[in-house]
Image: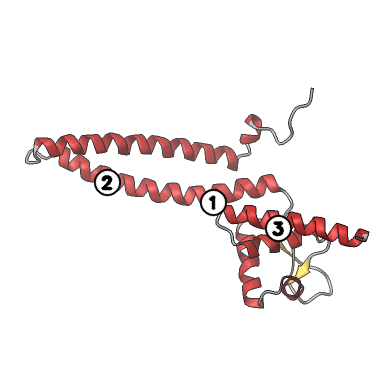
Amino acid sequence: MEDREKLENARLRVIDSIAQNMNLYGITPSVGRLYGLLYFNEEPLSLDTMKDELGMSKTSMSTSVRQLQELNMVEKIWKKGTRKDLYHSVDDWYQSFTDYFSITWRKGVALNISSINKSLEEVTELIENQETPGDLKCVAENDRKRYIYALEYYDWLNRLIDTFETKEIFNYVPKQKDTL
């Protein structure tokens, strides 16, 4: 195997691994491969070049690039004398990780808190209503305790997300392991 082929195989192995890893987080493998392609290219690439490299349609490529931009993993670059949009990867994986999880977790937390608060209101009405049978009040009170526990959890999760967004998390889990 010649050196260039060995280098290409090493890159493809890592790109495939990136794609599989991103798929675990709900990002399609094709989007993961696109990120991997951009990660290993020193120069920014156009949609046409990326399309040709990955064998995807231009529409699919555009959608994939937009998804990576929303995740702050890809940036559009302006280059003098070039009329096409060019893109390159954002290579700060720490920031990409914290951005992705912050965005994803915030959406999930907000949805869950909203549902729990609505349910908490309803069971509180049942508990406070004089006409609610005793056994139903007992069940409602148990549910109320579970809702309050869940809200405490989501408060903790919001505070954890805050540490990601402020980068305070790196005070507790440094990017580099201390060596002795």
Q: Residues within 10 Å of mark 3 (few under 14, many from 20)?
A: some
Residue at position x 53%, y 41% from top? 161
Q: Position of residue 91 (x, y in %)?
A: 74, 52
Badge 3 or badge 1: first in the primary sequence: 3
Horizontal side of 136 relative to 149 (left or right) equals: left
| As drawn, 173 above or below 113 | above
Q: CA distance from mark 2 to mark 1?
A: 25 Å
**Colour approach in the figure:** secondary structure
| As drawn, 106 above or below 130 | below
Q: Nearer the viewer, mark 3 or mark 1?
A: 3
Identify the secondary structure beneath mark 2: helix
Amino acid on which disc 3 is placed? Asp
Q: Which residue is mark 1?
A: 103
Badge 3 or badge 2: first in the primary sequence: 3
Q: Position of residue 69 (x, y in %)?
A: 64, 61
Residue 15 visible (yes or no): yes
Residue at position x 55%, y 57% from top? 26
Amino acid on which disc 2 is placed? Ser
Horizontal side of 156 relative to 65 (left or right) equals: left
Most extreme residue toward the left is: 131
Pointers 3 and 2 in contact (C-beta within 8 Å): no
Amino acid on which disc 1 is placed? Ile
Residue 89 visible (yes or no): no
Q: Residues within 10 Å of mark 2 (few under 14, many from 20)?
A: some
Q: Which residue is mark 3?
A: 16
Horizontal side of 135 relative to 73 (left or right) equals: left
Using the rendered view, name the quadrant where residue 70 is placed: bottom right
Q: Which mark is residue 119?
A: 2
